[in-house]
Amino acid sequence: MAEYSSEARHLDGRLLVAMPSMGDPRFDRSVIYICAHSDSGAMGLIVNKPAADLKFADLLDQLDIKADRPIEGIDVHYGGPVEHGRGFVLHSRDYGSEDSTLTVNDDFGMTATLDILEDISQGFGPQSCLLALGYAGWGPGQLEGEIRENGWLICDADASLVFSADHEGKWAAAMKQIGIDPRVLSMEGGSA
């Protein structure tokens, strides 16, 4: 068996783009930002599927967090099928908490504590952010196998794409960034 590419071993801070042949409807046309990837598995957040029935202001009300300013332009996303009651904020690196922010790279951080929601509501949060409930998770070797089976494409994570308000267009934009016209992709995968 051929050695798997080193690109697929170090996916922190990269995007996974679902192939049209993706068999799992939860990931259909998904774009996932990978927050952590190691020999122990991987964790990421779907960045292009806002929750239709939940707004950021509603979430703040549920958590009894009072906003000192109008809260607009922050969508709550379906982050993935694991722990969908748990919240994560993917954000620009102009924000960070020494104790609770995972620094993914120079451009992105991820924080999963209430502090960031309070800071956002007070106007002290990051310049760019995306709130997700739940996450996508893979066990050891599982994601690598899905990539080998043509379930995912990999591309660089551009902040303008990740934090774009055009959620419907993120999948096509990621495909374009890779250099692929989605109209020519086959529903069937294969390998040589």
Image (cartoon, rainbow, N blue to C red):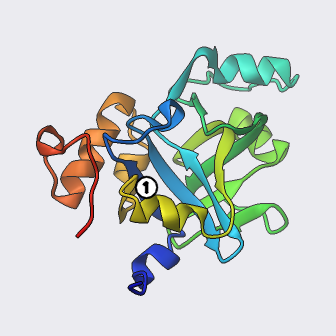
Q: Quadrant of the N terminus?
A: bottom left
Image point 48% across, 58% down: which residue? 146
Vertical comparison of 173 with 3: above or below:
above
Image point 54% across, 62% down: which residue? 143
Give the percent coordinates (x, y) of residue 139.
69, 62
- As helix, strand or loop, the secondary structure at mark 1 comes to strand
- Using a 10 Å C-alpha cutoff, classify the residue at mark 1 as few (fewer than 14 neighbours), some (14 to 19) or many (20 or more): many
Q: Residue furthest top?
A: 53
Q: Dot 1 corresponds to which residue?
A: 16
Vertical comparison of 25 with 100: above or below:
above
- Name the residue type under label 1: Leu
Vertical comparison of 75 with 9: above or below:
above
Image point 53% across, 32% down: which residue? 26
Given residues 153 and 144, the one toward you in this image is 144
Is residue 89 visible in the rendered image? The answer is: yes
Q: Quadrant of the C terminus?
A: bottom left
Give the percent coordinates (x, y) of residue 191.
27, 65
Q: How many marks?
A: 1
Image check: 40 left or right of 146?
right
Give the percent coordinates (x, y) of residue 8.
45, 74
Given residues 5 and 161, the one toward you in this image is 5
Image point 36% across, 65% down: which residue? 156
Given residues 53 and 97, the one toward you in this image is 53
Give the percent coordinates (x, y) of residue 167.
39, 32
Q: Residue furthest bottom?
A: 3
Q: Residue furthest right?
A: 64
Given residues 166 and 124, the one toward you in this image is 166
Location of residue 186 (image quadrant): top left
Vertical comparison of 31 with 58: above or below:
below
Image check: 85 left or right of 19?
right
Is residue 125 visible in the rendered image? The answer is: no
